[in-house]
């Protein structure tokens, strides 16, 4: 059975070392970031089971970090660890989507108990996820980012695979451009939009010879992935 993976953001290096060490001794995989921006980038690039965030961090504080992550994932548990003791800060954290708020100095035993509770709760709510799709002559393995059949195998980047899966989950329906950008990157930023165009162009080339499959550009609206 795999170890649960924790994203831990804390700028106090001593506290971070001690907490990470304790969590790893309890068989958790812990990825530590020392500022909020690095944590958000890491969250966008990797999969996690739970997040633990300090609030007062450089570059992006824990409140803004939690708010950004909630735009990407509504369900992942988030726990704040903070020296901020005001009731208003606790309320703000919970309103931003945090599941709990522990005040420093905190008990590692209490933190471990909270993690266990939230992981059990989130595991119960995980739906069955389809991982293999039929795409023309190909089978699409969403976990390994591969299109394959008996004769060939085409590797996709993670973003290309995520985009193709999004299209397949909404096949023959209109997907608004901002909806795609928010689903894949958590923002409809202009530069992400340019990246999206590149990924769509590559998917078109890969599927160009597949009869009945097309990615239609609806000017000013978005795209329709049609599959017969």
Image: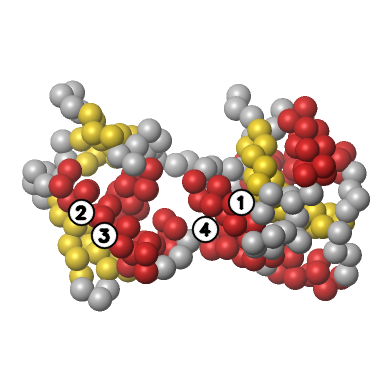
Quick one: SS at disc 3? helix
Q: Distance between the residues labelled 4 and 1?
A: 13 Å
Q: Which of marks 2 and 4 is nearer the N terminus?
A: 4
The single residue placed furthest to the bottom in the displayed view is 220
Which part of the image, by quadrant, shows the N terminus?
top right
Q: Which of marks 4 and 3 is nearer the N terminus?
A: 4
Residue at (88%, 70%) from the top-left corner?
Answer: 86
Q: How far apart are marks 4 and 3 (CA)?
A: 20 Å
Report if residue 169 is visible in the image. Answer: no
Q: Which of marks 1 and 2 is nearer the N terminus?
A: 1
Q: How far apart are marks 1 and 2 (CA)?
A: 30 Å
Q: Distance between the residues labelled 2 and 4?
A: 24 Å
Horizontal and vertical percent position of residue 101: 80, 57
Q: On residue 197, which mark appears?
A: 3
* Labels 4, 1: front one: 1
What residue is pinned by disc 2? Answer: 201
Horizontal and vertical percent position of residue 144: 38, 33
Horizontal and vertical percent position of residue 136: 16, 41
Q: Distance between the residues labelled 3 and 2?
A: 6 Å
What residue is pinned by disc 1? Answer: 39
Residue at (27%, 52%) from the top-left corner?
Answer: 199
Q: Crowdedness of circle 2 by 10 Å Cα count: few (<14), some, many (20+)?
A: few
What residue is pinned by disc 4? Answer: 72
Tell me whether the residue at label 3 lies in contact with that at label 2, contact meaning CB atoms closer than 8 angstroms.
yes
Residue at (81%, 69%) from the top-left corner?
Answer: 89
Image label count = 4
Report the front residue among 141 and 39.
Answer: 39
Tell me whether the residue at label 4 lies in contact with that at label 1, contact meaning CB atoms closer than 8 angstroms.
no
Report the front residue among 129 and 186.
Answer: 186
């Amino acid at each position: 059975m795999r170890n649960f993976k924790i994203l831990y953001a804390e700028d106090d290096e001593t506290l971070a070392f001690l907490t990470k060490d304790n969590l790893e001794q309890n068989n958790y995989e812990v990825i530590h970031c020392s500022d909020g921006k690095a944590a958000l980038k890491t969250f966008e690039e990797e999969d996690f089971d739970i997040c633990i965030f300090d609030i007062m961090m450089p570059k992006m504080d824990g409140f803004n970090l939690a708010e950004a992550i909630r735009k990407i994932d509504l369900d992942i548990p988030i726990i704040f660890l903070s020296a901020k003791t005001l009731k208003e800060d606790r309320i703000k954290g919970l309103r931003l989507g945090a599941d709990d708020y522990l005040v420093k100095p905190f008990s590692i035993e209490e933190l471990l108990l909270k993690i266990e509770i939230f992981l059990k709760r989130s595991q119960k709510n995980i739906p069955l996820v389809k991982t293999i799709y039929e795409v023309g002559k190909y089978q699409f393995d969403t976990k390994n980012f591969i299109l394959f059949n008996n004769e060939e195998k085409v590797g996709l980047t993670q973003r290309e695979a995520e985009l193709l899966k999004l299209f397949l989950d909404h096949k023959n329906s209109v997907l608004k451009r901002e909806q795609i950008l928010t689903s894949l990157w958590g923002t409809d930023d202009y530069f992400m939009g340019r990246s999206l165009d590149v990924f769509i162009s590559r998917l078109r080339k890969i599927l160009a010879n597949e009869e009945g499959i097309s990615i239609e550009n609806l000017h000013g609206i978005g795209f329709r992935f049609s599959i017969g």
